[in-house]
C-alpha cells in the first residue's frame, strides 16, 4: 500500500492523463490494484514540477511607498528611494517581509528561489537576515543568495571588500551591475572582479547586465569572454540584458551565437522591465526586453524572472512567475502556437537548470515535488494565470487553493462558468 495516488494527472507533454504514485516522499511505480492510503482525483489537471524563481530581490519586497513613493515610476527614482529605505533596514524588518513573500511564492508553486541581495551596506544587514532565512526555509522554499552590489563594485566606496565579505559570509552567487559603474572601464573591471571572486570561492555568477536602453552598453560580451576563458559554462547567468533589444542586427547576431557558445543562462524580467525601460523614448516606446526568441533559436537557456514584488521599482505583483510569463507572451511576441508552451518551461525546467537544482522533474524515484494547476493544459495555465490547486513537496501537500466557483444568471437561469473551452459554460 502506497501513501498517495494522484488520479488523472496531466504531466507536461502528456497527451492523456496518467496516475502518479507517491510513497515515502518519492514518485514510485503504480502499485498493482492501485491501493493507496489516500487518493486525490485531479480530473486531467496540468501537473508540472515546481516553479523556479531565478531572479527576485527579496530584501526589497513589500517596501513600496517607504519612505516615500516613486512618483515617476522610473528606475533611477527607484534606486534613490531604495537608497533611503536601506538606512532603516533591520534584520527583523527584512525577515518579516520576506517570510510573507516566501509563503506567497510557495502558494504559487515556487519551491526554488534565487534572490539578489543588496550588499552596498557596511553592516550587510539584508544579507545576514536572508542567510538566516535560507536555513529556516530550506526544504520548503530553497534559497540561493546573490551578493548584489546595487550601487556598483568599483564605484561604491569599499565595494570590492563588501562583495568579498558577502561571499565569505555565505552568498551562493556573485553578482554585479557593470552598466551602473562610473566608466566603461570600471564596468569591465567589475565583471572580471566578479568572475575572480566566483572562481576563488567556487560560486556561480549572476550579473545584472546591460539593464539600460543604451545600445552602447555591451558588458554581456565581457561575461561571454570570461565564461569561455575560465571554462565556467553552465555556471553563469546574465540577467535583464535589455540593451540587447537595441543593438544593431550584425552585432546582435555575433553576440547571440557567442552567448550560445559560452553556455550562458539568460533571465528576462518582463514585469519590471516593461515599466522601467523606454523611459527616455517619446515614441515609439521600446518594449525593453532582451532578444528572447533569437536566443532560444540559437539554443540558449532563457528563463523568466519576477524581479520585484511591491518595491520602489515595481509596485505590483504577488510573486507568481506565471503572471510574468503572461506578460512576456505579449511583450515578447510569444503568442505563436509553438511559442506559448515554451513559457511554462521558462518558469520551471529552464530556471531549474540555471540554478543547478538537483533532483528536479517528475520521474520514478524522484522527489514528489509538483504543482497541480487549476487548468488542463500549459496554454490554459498561462491564459488564465490559473490558480495552483495543490502544491506538493516531498509527497506532502504544502499549499492548496480551492478553485473559484463562478456562475452567471442567463435568461434567469444560474449557470456555472469555468472559462475552459472544452467544458460546458
Ligand atoms: Fe533585478
Image: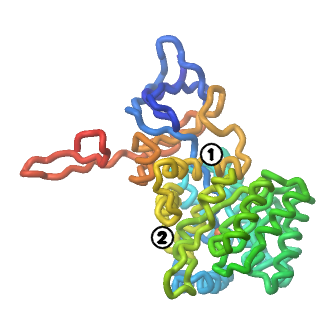
Residue for point 60% across, 63% down: 98
- Does residue 174 appear left or right of residue 303 in this picture? right
Q: Secondary structure at mark 1?
A: helix
Residue closer to the observer: 173 or 129: 173
Residue for point 47% across, 40% down: 372
> Percent x, y for residue 41?
40, 30
Can residue 312 be seen? no
Say few, some or many: other residues with alpha carbon within 10 Å of mark 2 (under 14 / 14 to 19 / 20 or more): some
Residue closer to the observer: 88 or 185: 185
Indicate whether 4 appears above or below 69. Answer: above
Residue for point 41% across, 47% down: 380
Residue 139 numbered mark, or none: none
Q: Residue furthest front?
A: 250
- Viewer-side label of 1, 2: 1
> Percent x, y for residue 79?
64, 82
Residue for point 78% across, 60% down: 258
Quadrant of the image occupied by residue 187: bottom right
> Percent x, y for residue 214?
67, 81
Residue bearing the label numbered 2: 316
Q: Secondary structure at mark 2?
A: loop
- Does residue 127 appear left or right of residue 71 in this picture? right
Can residue 242 be seen? yes
Say few, some or many: other residues with alpha carbon within 10 Å of mark 1 (under 14 / 14 to 19 / 20 or more): many
Indicate whether 142 appears above or below 63. Answer: above
**Circles 1 and 2: CB distance less than 8 Å?**
no
| Total numbered circles | 2
Residue bearing the label numbered 1: 349
CA distance separating discs 1 and 2: 25 Å
Indicate whether 349 appears above or below 125. Answer: above
Amino acid at each position: 500500500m502506497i501513501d498517495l495516488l494522484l488520479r488523472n494527472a496531466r504531466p507536461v507533454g502528456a497527451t492523456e492523463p496518467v496516475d502518479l504514485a507517491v510513497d515515502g516522499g518519492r514518485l514510485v511505480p503504480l502499485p498493482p490494484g492501485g491501493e493507496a492510503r489516500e487518493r486525490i482525483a485531479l480530473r486531467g489537471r496540468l501537473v508540472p514540477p515546481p516553479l523556479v524563481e531565478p531572479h527576485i530581490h527579496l530584501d526589497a519586497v513589500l517596501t513600496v511607498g517607504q519612505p516615500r513613493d516613486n512618483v515617476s515610476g522610473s528606475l533611477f527614482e527607484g534606486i534613490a528611494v531604495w537608497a533611503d529605505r536601506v538606512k532603516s533596514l533591520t534584520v527583523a524588518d527584512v525577515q518579516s517581509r520576506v517570510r510573507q513573500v516566501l509563503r506567497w511564492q510557495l502558494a504559487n508553486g515556487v519551491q526554488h528561489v534565487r534572490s539578489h541581495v543588496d550588499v552596498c551596506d557596511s553592516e550587510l544587514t539584508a544579507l545576514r537576515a536572508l542567510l538566516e532565512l535560507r536555513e529556516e526555509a530550506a526544504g520548503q522554499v530553497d534559497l540561493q543568495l546573490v551578493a548584489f552590489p546595487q550601487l556598483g563594485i568599483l564605484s561604491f566606496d569599499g565595494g570590492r571588500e563588501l562583495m568579498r565579505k558577502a561571499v565569505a559570509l555565505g552568498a551562493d552567487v556573485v553578482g554585479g551591475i557593470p552598466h551602473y559603474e562610473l566608466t566603461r572601464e570600471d564596468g569591465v573591471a567589475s565583471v572580471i572582479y566578479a568572475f575572480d571572486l566566483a572562481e576563488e570561492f567556487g560560486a556561480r555568477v549572476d550579473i545584472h547586465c546591460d539593464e539600460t536602453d543604451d545600445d552602447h552598453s555591451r558588458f554581456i560580451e565581457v561575461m561571454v569572454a570570461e565564461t569561455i576563458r575560465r571554462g565556467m559554462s553552465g555556471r553563469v547567468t546574465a540577467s535583464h540584458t535589455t540593451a540587447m533589444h537595441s543593438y544593431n542586427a550584425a552585432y546582435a547576431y555575433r553576440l547571440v551565437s557567442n552567448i550560445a557558445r559560452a553556455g550562458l543562462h539568460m533571465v528576462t524580467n518582463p514585469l519590471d522591465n516593461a515599466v522601467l525601460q523606454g523611459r527616455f523614448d517619446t515614441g515609439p516606446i521600446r518594449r525593453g526586453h532582451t532578444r528572447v526568441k533569437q536566443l532560444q533559436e540559437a539554443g540558449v537557456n532563457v528563463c523568466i524572472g519576477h524581479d520585484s514584488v511591491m518595491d520602489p521599482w515595481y509596485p505590483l505583483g504577488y510573486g507568481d512567475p506565471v503572471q510574468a510569463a503572461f506578460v512576456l507572451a505579449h511583450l515578447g511576441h510569444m503568442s505563436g502556437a509553438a511559442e506559448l508552451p515554451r513559457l511554462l518551461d521558462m518558469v520551471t525546467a529552464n530556471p531549474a537548470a540555471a540554478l543547478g537544482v538537483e533532483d528536479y522533474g517528475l520521474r520514478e524515484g524522484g522527489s514528489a515535488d509538483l504543482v497541480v494547476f487549476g487548468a488542463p493544459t500549459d496554454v490554459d495555465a498561462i491564459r488564465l494565470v490559473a490558480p495552483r490547486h495543490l502544491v506538493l513537496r516531498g509527497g506532502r501537500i504544502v499549499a492548496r487553493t480551492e478553485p473559484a466557483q463562478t456562475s452567471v444568471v442567463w435568461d434567469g437561469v444560474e449557470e456555472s462558468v469555468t472559462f475552459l473551452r472544452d467544458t460546458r459554460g
